[in-house]
Image (tube, grey):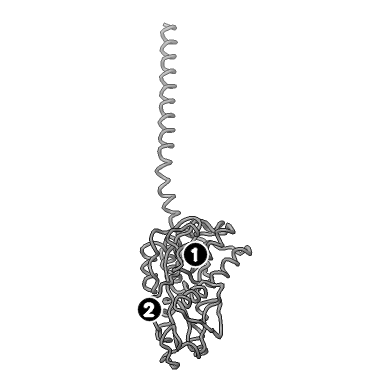
Amino acid sequence: MRLSRRLAMTALSLLSAASLVACGGTSSTTTSSSAPSEAPSTTAAAGKLSGEITVLAAASLKGVFQEIGDKLKADNPDLTIKFDFQGSQDLVTSLDQGNSADVLATANNSTMTKAVEKHLVGEQTEFATNVLTLIVPKGNPKGITGLDSSLDDVDLVICAPEVPCGKASRELADAKGVTLNPVSEEQKVTDVVGKVESGEADAGLVYVTDATAAKDKVDKIDIPDNTVVNHYPIAPTAKPANPEGAKAFIDAVTGETGQKVLAKYGFGAPAGTPASGTPAAAPTSKDPEAGSAPTGTSTP
């Protein structure tokens, strides 16, 4: 009897232990399987961008980038976007001097090439093209007819040679067999527009997009058979403080919505497939300083 009772008690103990192990195993499995189910909600919560990004952009991009930025912020209210609009060369110099930024957009490939050679930026993509046009004060008081001898005795303002629109202006003049004698050379294309708007200058060479932005403040004189095309690349900086924000802004510019806004402002579509890596190797570039066809160039 005692032996039977002992056997019974032993069996009962073993059964209880097995039950506890089984319960413990079930609990462990439940915990591990619930972890992945929480991951999507965590990812979703992090889907909205936050923090701050600084975008360095050519002066000719001011209006269009501000509008694209506003659209991005509308979807991401916790994101702050700061812009610095200058001549493209000044932007690269600023980066080279150690000023922090997240995105760089220039008005030509050759200026971006300098940033690449200095290891200041990452992968770049072409997102727009642009061409030059003449603008004159409202009513065209000097009777300017185009990029011709009618510019000989007037106060002409163009961009400085070290910035993209200045390089493009000189290349265009060479292509047309015209000698330019500017009374002033500006570091930003928007400064050229300002001098024509105010009547300080009789004519100015600017991008079509800047003439469009000036609306009824100036008159535009188209330049027929203009083969000088400026190609605009954009890239994240080498060490962005907010890489997710930088990528989101670049995606906004190169995506469908951004391209529609660019078209509204008068920009042309990027030539061919967006280039990546070193701009000098980009097959779509028409910038002579980027090592491709002489019919291309760029802008500030």
Looking at the image, residue 40 sits to the left or right of residue 53; the answer is left
* Secondary structure of the residue carrying numbered label 2: loop
- Going by the picture, which residue comes out furthest to the bottom? 141
Q: Are marks 1 and 2 in contact (CB under 8 Å)?
A: no
Q: How many marks?
A: 2
Q: Amino acid at mark 1?
A: Asn
Residue depicted at 51% across the width and 82% down the height? 180
Of badges 1 and 2, nearer the viewer stands: 2
Is residue 80 in sight in this rendering?
Answer: no
The quadrant where residue 222 appears: bottom left
Residue depicted at 44% across the width and 84% down the height? 148
Is residue 169 in sight in this rendering?
Answer: yes
Indicate whether 228 appears above or below 282: below
* Secondary structure of the residue carrying numbered label 1: helix
Front residue of this view, candidates 185 and 74: 185
x, y percentage for residue 218? 43, 86
**Dot label at residue 109:** 1
Front residue of this view, candidates 31 and 173: 173
Indicate whether 42 appears above or below 213: above
The quadrant where residue 91 appears: bottom right
x, y percentage for residue 292? 47, 62
The quadrant where residue 214 appears: bottom left
Q: Amino acid at mark 2?
A: Pro
Residue depicted at 56% across the width and 69% down the height? 89
Q: CA distance from mark 1 to mark 2?
A: 24 Å
- The residue identified by callout 2 is 224
Q: Quadrant of the N terminus?
A: top left
**Along the polypeptide, which appears first: circle 1 or circle 2?**
1
**Dot label at residue 33:** none
x, y percentage for residue 184? 56, 83
